[in-house]
Amino acid sequence: MTMTRRIKKEPFLILLSLAALVIWGSGIYYGQYIKEHYQAVSIRMEEAGVSEEKFMAALQYEEVKNPKNIPRISAWNRLEEQNIENGTLATSYKSQLIEVSGDIRQVYPMKLAKGNILTPEDYEGCMIDQEVAYKLFGTVDAVGNTVTYQNKQYYIRGIIKSPEPVIFLQMNDKKHTYSNMELVYDDMEKGQELAKAFMEQNNLAISYTVLDGSFYAGIIDGFCKAPAWFLGFYILGQILAAIWKRRTIPLQVVVLLVILISVWMLLKWLLGLQINLPERFIPTKWSDFSFWAGRYKELREQIGQTVYLAPTVKDIIFLRYVKRCIVYTLISLAGVWIFALHIRSLLGKTNGLCLATLAVILECGAIVILYKTEKVFPAGNGYLYMLPIFIMAEDLVNKGKSWIKARI
């Protein structure tokens, strides 16, 4: 390699690392958004809805029959093109309206901009998004003002950021029916199974679709960690390759095996790398291939059912953010792979500790960029420490190989 190519290669790898960290952080942001806002089992009824009176009676029955698995229920409807008025300024605006009974945060993924979340028993208040606030009041800070809907005034408790114009109202009518329900259990591992049993045993609806948001959120959360898993297995793979080459020298094999186990335990402890497999995907016998076929068929049927559902904002945001999370994670994985292939050449010219320090600086730069673009998230150890730990581990592996070769 010529000196010119070396000079060009180093800045390229540095910029590539920064880009990979920013893109990976974006993927984690969308993954954690899904994990935070999609923890319920959603029930979408295709025919007549369920009244609050009916599902509250079902909850009372569950308290006697199954007291350990009582769901927290939030029910809702979406109404299109509802006329909302500002009587003071004589302005009006058509917006979708969401009728709610329960916790609004389970009904609609939202980011509060001003004020407070509308509580379940606040029948005189409402929440609107920034666009509705601006159209009615000429400002996005309209907390405390009133709007009129169907000749009744509601006080604005909070303003949210939303991809579509929306207003929320808590319904004060026990007989009012809802076509959507969100069920949250303490044991969400069995959420889908418990939700189906709750609907069937209480005869709440004949035709409905069950969407296990918690299950899909768990899968996406695990997928976000793919770059960290890749770098961890990349290091372990090199140690295994060294063991295989020296399989005829027992002492070196023992030493390398100890190093392999130590590195794995260190990575697992430092980075919190673990696989969370839902119970429904753990067979009683791993050789039971019909079990896997059944789970795959169940997933396909559930995904197929969603195609025919009327899209809601909650569904649209979910699909949009899942796609972004997957695309960003895959792009960052490609960048990390390229970095891993070329790190050895940098370690041959630069001290491992210096490169690890540079990686920490790049991490800080990536976090600043993400903060400036409003992608703020609680970063896990895998994101914060994987790159510097990988560099130090790679440096240690290279030195170990050199030490072994010198003694052959």
Image (cartoon, helix red, strand yellow):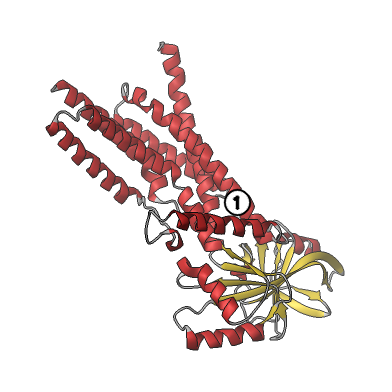
* Amino acid, disc 1: Tyr
Which percent across, then down, holds residue 254?
Answer: 15, 37
At a point 51% along the width and 70% down the height, the residue shown is 193
At a point 55% along the width and 49% down the height, the residue shown is 375
Which percent across, then down, holds residue 51?
Answer: 68, 82
When asked about the image quadrant of residue 183, the answer is: bottom right
In-front residue for pair 46/301: 301
At a point 61% along the width and 75% down the height, the residue shown is 74
Q: Furthest residue to the top?
A: 2
> What residue sits right under mark 1 in the picture?
321
Asked whether residue 240 is in view, the answer is yes
Tell how many labels: 1
Taking the image as shown, residue 45 lies to the left or right of residue 233, namely right
When asked about the image quadrant of residue 267, the answer is: top left
In the image, residue 103 sits, relative to residue 348, either above or below, namely below
Taking the image as shown, residue 238 lies to the left or right of residue 139, namely left
Q: In which quadrant is the N terminus drawn?
A: top left
In the image, residue 332 sits, relative to residue 311, either above or below, namely above
Asked whether residue 35 is in view, the answer is no
At a point 53% along the width and 68% down the height, the residue shown is 192
Q: In which quadrant is the C terminus drawn?
A: top left
Taking the image as shown, residue 135 lies to the left or right of residue 355, namely right
In-front residue for pair 152/347: 347
In-front residue for pair 295/216: 295
